[in-house]
Amino acid sequence: MTVGIIIGTHGESARELLKSAEMIIGKQDNVEFITFVPGENTDTLIQKFHEKLDALDTSEGVLFMVDLFGGSPYNAASQIALPKEKMDVVTGVNIPMLLETLSMRAASGFEDLRNTALTAGSDGVKSLKQSLKNVEEDDL
Amino acid sequence: MDIRLARIDDRLIHGQVATVWTKETQVERIIVCNDEVAKDEIRSTLLKQVAPPGVVSNVVDVEKGIRAYNNPKYETTPVMLLFTNPTDVLRFVEAGVPIKTVNIGGMAFREGKTQITNAVSVDATDVAAFRALNEKGIELEIRKVAADNKVMMIQLLDKEGL
């Protein structure tokens, strides 16, 4: 099986991030998401994460992908992941991070996949004009 | 040239191609073959810019694409050929480029086209080119990403009476 993934964000964006990623790379297995809505706290989020964990194959590990470092989804996921060996929480979840991580799961173990997530998450942030400078000319 | 994938996708290099197909096919080069796009400096520049890491992209007209195929320098290079329409694919095939299978990812709907799947619409010119490719024994499979099931273009054209 592949590393399990749970996306967790403030509001509904976790649901939509997964939908957007699946629009590009197709339906994904072993992925869940949780949303965090007004009236909930870290305890309710821990409960939500546990329900999703029950729905996943966790044998290869679980990567929590949350929006904000120090936010409630992060705090809840961290309480679950900290004592577990093959679990970690990465922050700043975005579409490039999700695409790269989801599509590398079949070929990657837990540690590799975490690095993939971190690299893709930051490398996906670019400027049009600045990155034009890196376009190499190759005429064929 | 080691043609790992010949794809028709009028969005050219975008998420599905950059993320899914480049990994799936392990290509070193993506060659976009289209006469109009090759003349359009802005689009050409942007297509070069969005090539995935480690992959070179070229934007050429159909003639130049065929010449590149025949250039011994690229004999073993694994490539993805990207087209916007089946007529250009037929030009390649008729020039002797041995394309065995064509993956059809997306052809947008516009006035005068018939929509045959949620991602693929065709007009009379497209139908004629697909029919000609089919007669040459070339597999025409509709698939957005590698994990999708192949849907055969000809069966859909037959079903629609096109």
Image: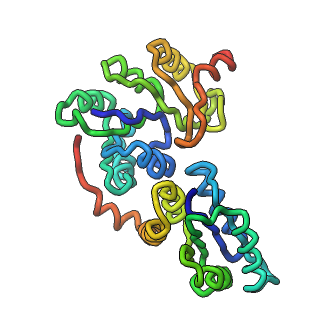
Here the colouring is rainbow
Toward the top, the furthest residue is B135
Quadrant of the image for the C terminus of chain A? top left
Quadrant of the image for the N terminus of chain A? bottom right
Looking at the rendering, which quadrant does residue A76 occupy?
A: bottom right
Q: Position of residue A138 (x, y in %)?
A: 23, 47
Residue B39, can we see it?
no
Looking at the rendering, which quadrant does residue B53 occupy?
A: bottom left
Q: Residue at x 24, y 36 (%)?
A: B76
Q: Position of residue B49 (x, y in %)?
A: 36, 55
Q: Position of residue A118 (x, y in %)?
A: 46, 72
Q: Position of residue B71 (x, y in %)?
A: 19, 31
Q: Is residue B36 above or below residue A90?
A: above
Q: Is residue A42 above or below residue A36?
A: below
The foreground one among A93 and B146 is B146
Left or right, residue B147 beside residue B86: right
Q: Residue at x 46, y 15 (%)?
A: B137
Left or right, residue B111 beside residue A38: left
Q: Residue at x 45, y 26 (%)?
A: B101
Q: Is residue B55 above or below residue A108?
A: above
Q: Residue at x 33, y 61 (%)?
A: A132
